Amino acid sequence: MSTPPEEPAESPALEITKAGYANAQDVIKFIDTKASIATGLITLAIGASLLVTQWLAEREATSHFCPNVVATRSPTLWLLAQMFLVVGTGAGALALHWAIATIRPRMRTGRSRFAILFPQYDPSQHRAAAVRTLAKLNPNFTREGELREYKSQLLNVGAALFAKMSNLKRSLGYMEFQFLAYAAAFTLVMLAAIS
């Protein structure tokens, strides 16, 4: 009885390429999680600002927090508070846009090459290329073929990672500005109400 031939050990290049690919996928999951949390916080902050605005609008005319009373007492502070509220909401909308852009799946565009590690393709346009690529997966598929596939996917995953990190950075920057603007608006309303 013959024993099957031993599988050759992976080359260092293939090992590190696989590790890089796995690491990039883990980082992408982490970035998507952060973007999801940011989306929730941004939405919560916009909702809270609308509730506070509604609460202020419903105050009785004798209340220190009635918009007419506050605007009469300190028109400059009231105008600045409104400006910060609007700017904060605009920053929140931009932060939400970039957070969603971070999470949004990316489609392969303009490429006919089917990838084994990322088998997304348009069957109406690239079915033949996909069938040819999958036909290479036979007992003679080599380590060089595997390495070539990982190298190709590292380029794609690296580009996706860059886009996700850039979008998340924008989102978090706008979110920070949103929170600061809301804090300034709240502080100005409080100052105007007690002046």
Image: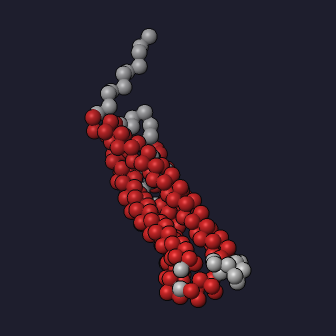
Measuring from the top left, give residue 6's x and y in whole percent.
Answer: 36, 22
As drawn, 117 above or below 65: above
Image quadrant assignment for residue 171: bottom left
As drawn, 193 above or below 5: below
Which residue is nearer to you in this view: 102 or 117?
A: 102
Image quadrant assignment for residue 71: bottom right
What residue is rendered at 46% in x and 69% in y?
Answer: 180
Instruction: Tell me how many marks there are.
Output: 0
What residue is rendered at 43% in x and 33% in y?
Answer: 139
Image quadrant assignment for residue 113: bottom left
Q: Name the quarter where the N terminus is drawn.
A: top left
What residue is rendered at 56% in x and 86% in y?
Answer: 73
Measuring from the top left, give residue 182's x and y in whole percent.
Answer: 51, 71
Which residue is nearer to you in this view: 147 or 15?
A: 15
Which residue is nearer to you in this view: 69 or 56?
A: 69
Measuring from the top left, give residue 103's x and y in whole percent.
Answer: 51, 59
Is residue 86 visible in the rendered structure shown here? no
As drawn, 128 above or below 54: above
Measuring from the top left, give residue 195's x and y in whole percent.
Answer: 53, 80
